[in-house]
């Protein structure tokens, strides 16, 4: 079994395109954000079989799609779908390049503490679920998959241009805990693990 602790080292800088039915955050306004970002993480791997711990780093390209509805002039709730593709390089031993992906479905709440005609600054909490898949692309066909809860604290700034279009900049501090993961290969090996 393995554990990976995923924490943001360098804040995720996320730039999105915003489509809204209002210029500023106000009661009953709706916002749709589609973006592209980069995540940098610290990782800790704990192997339950030989009781060893390894640390490292991971990076990913992030594509989020989110919808937010204004319950009032300061509080909003929403739903977000995220796809992540993790960066990898060629393994010198197997001469193959692994790939890793994750997907997330989350709900969030935001408090909008500054809003003008063209600027909206807010912070919030996000909770949801995440899945992770890793394929070593080696001759043993090694794969790893897991799922679990996701939580993040974030601070965002939305800049609106024109009547219904804008950009979003975001700093996020996420934690994902993957439980009941399974690693397999074509020799019949199966290992259960937790990723954290």
Image (cartoon, grey):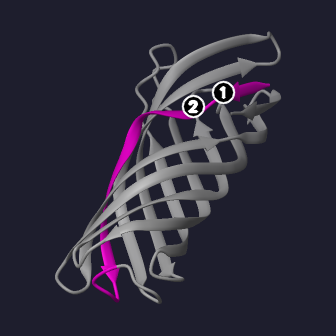
Please state which of residues 124 and 8 is positioned toward the viewer in this rendering: 124
Residue 154 lies in the magenta stretch: no
In the rendered view, does 125 fall on the left or right side of 23? right
Residue 7 x, y percent position in the rendering: 55, 34
Q: Which mark is residue 140?
A: 1
Question: Is the C-beta separation of discs 1 and 2 under 8 Å?
Answer: yes
Q: Main secondary structure of the magenta part?
A: strand
Task: Answer above or below: position of 173 versus 139.
Answer: below
Q: Residue at x 48, y 50 (%)?
A: 84
Tell me if mark 1 has few (under 14), some (14-19) or many (20+) residues whose alpha carbon lies within 10 angstroms of its own. some
Magenta region:
1-24
Residue 20 lies in the magenta stretch: yes
Residue 116 x, y percent position in the rendering: 26, 75
Q: Which mark is residue 164?
A: none
Q: Which residue is mark 2?
A: 136
Q: Residue at x 50, y 83 (%)?
A: 72
């Amino acid at each position: 079994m393995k554990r990976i602790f995923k924490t943001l080292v360098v804040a995720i800088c996320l730039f999105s395109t915003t489509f809204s039915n209002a210029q500023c955050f106000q009661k009953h306004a709706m916002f749709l954000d589609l973006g592209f970002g980069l995540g940098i993480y610290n990782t800790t791997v704990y192997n339950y079989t030989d009781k060893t711990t390894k640390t490292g780093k991971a990076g990913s390209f992030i594509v989020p799609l989110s919808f937010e509805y204004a319950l009032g002039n300061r509080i909003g709730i929403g739903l977000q779908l995220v796809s992540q593709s993790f960066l990898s390089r060629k393994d010198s031993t197997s001469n193959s390049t692994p790939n890793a992906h994750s997907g997330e479905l989350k709900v969030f709440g935001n408090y909008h503490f500054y809003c003008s005609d063209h600027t909206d600054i807010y912070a919030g909490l996000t909770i949801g679920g995440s899945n992770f898949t890793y394929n070593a692309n080696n001759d043993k066909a090694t794969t790893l998959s897991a799922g679990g809860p996701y939580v993040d604290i974030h601070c965002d700034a939305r800049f609106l241009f024109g009547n219904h279009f804008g950009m979003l900049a975001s700093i996020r501090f996420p934690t994902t805990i993957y439980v009941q993961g399974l690693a397999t290969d074509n020799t019949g090996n199966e290992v259960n693990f937790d990723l954290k």
